[in-house]
């Protein structure tokens, strides 16, 4: 860790804290942790791992290879059908983004409202012009 290397090299802790934008208590905590355990890695978060997360990590890569054209909602439904566990599309999206290969390209839904409007604003979809028209005074 660069912060501790700087402290070890003899730089004042206050200067190291400013240089690396960390607090003094953080530096003290890291030094104490290294002294007590020999390492500065944080302790794991207590509790058991998520069951859905483990199932998704094992299931998702194979499922994506076999069904690369499904939407997040369709992937969600397939997961629920196979495992009987409810999961959100956000969870599926985060699991895909967290894959070791750096994620999976998301399918663009061509029939969605967002795709149909092609850059037009919601005002245009409602039937209003995008630009204000000057009112003319008739006489």
Image (tube, helix red, strand yellow):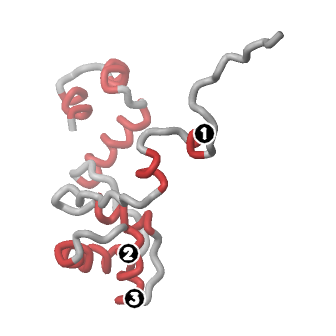
Q: Considering the numbered disc 1 on the image, is that residue within a helix, a strand or a loop?
A: helix
Percent x, y of residue 1: 21, 38
Q: In which quarter of the image is residue 76?
A: bottom left
Q: Name the residue under label 3.
A: 81
Measured in 3D between alpha carbons, the distance from the residue under mark 1 to the one under mark 3, in whole angstroms, is 39 Å
Point 43% across, 89% down: residue: 84
Between marks 3 and 2 in the image, the one whose residue lies nearer the viewer: 2
Percent x, y of residue 83: 37, 88
Question: Mark 2 or mark 1, which has the lower sequence index?
Answer: 2
How crowded pointer 2 is (Cα within 10 Å; few <14, some 14-19, many 20+) is rated as few
In the image, 30 versus 92, the foreground residue is: 92
How crowded pointer 3 is (Cα within 10 Å; few <14, some 14-19, many 20+) is rated as few
Question: Mark 1 or mark 3, which has the lower sequence index?
Answer: 3
How crowded pointer 1 is (Cα within 10 Å; few <14, some 14-19, many 20+) is rated as few
Give the total number of marks visible in the rendering.
3
Point 32% across, 48% down: residue: 33
Point 38% across, 78% down: residue: 52
Percent x, y of residue 66: 18, 78
Q: Name the residue under label 1.
A: 123
Q: Horizontally, is 72 left or right of 35 in the view?
A: right
Between marks 2 and 1 in the image, the one whose residue lies nearer the viewer: 1
In the image, 139 versus 45, the foreground residue is: 139
Point 29% across, 64% down: residue: 96
Q: Mark 2 points at which residue?
A: 74
Q: Quadrant of residue 15?
A: top left
Q: Kindly check if marks 1 and 3 are in contact, taking CB atoms under 8 A apart as contact.
A: no
Question: Mark 3 or mark 2, which has the lower sequence index?
Answer: 2
Percent x, y of residue 122: 57, 43
Which quadrant is home to the C terminus?
top right
Q: Considering the numbered disc 3 on the image, is that residue within a helix, a strand or a loop?
A: helix
In the image, 110 versus 41, the foreground residue is: 110
The relative height of residue 130 versus residue 47 in the rendered view (above or below) is above
């Amino acid at each position: 860790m660069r912060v501790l290397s700087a402290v070890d090299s003899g730089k004042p802790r206050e200067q190291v804290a400013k240089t690396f934008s960390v607090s003094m208590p953080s530096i003290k905590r890291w030094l104490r942790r290294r002294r007590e355990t020999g390492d500065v890695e944080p302790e794991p978060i207590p509790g058991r791992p998520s069951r859905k997360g483990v199932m998704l990590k094992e299931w998702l890569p194979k499922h994506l290879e076999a069904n690369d054209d499904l939407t997040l909602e369709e992937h969600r439904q397939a997961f629920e059908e196979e495992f009987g566990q409810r999961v959100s599309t956000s969870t599926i999206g985060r699991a895909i983004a967290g894959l070791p290969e750096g994620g999976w390209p998301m399918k663009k839904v061509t029939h969605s409202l967002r795709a149909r409007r092609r850059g037009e604003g919601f005002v245009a979809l409602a039937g209003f012009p995008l630009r204000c028209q000057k009112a003319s005074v008739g006489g």
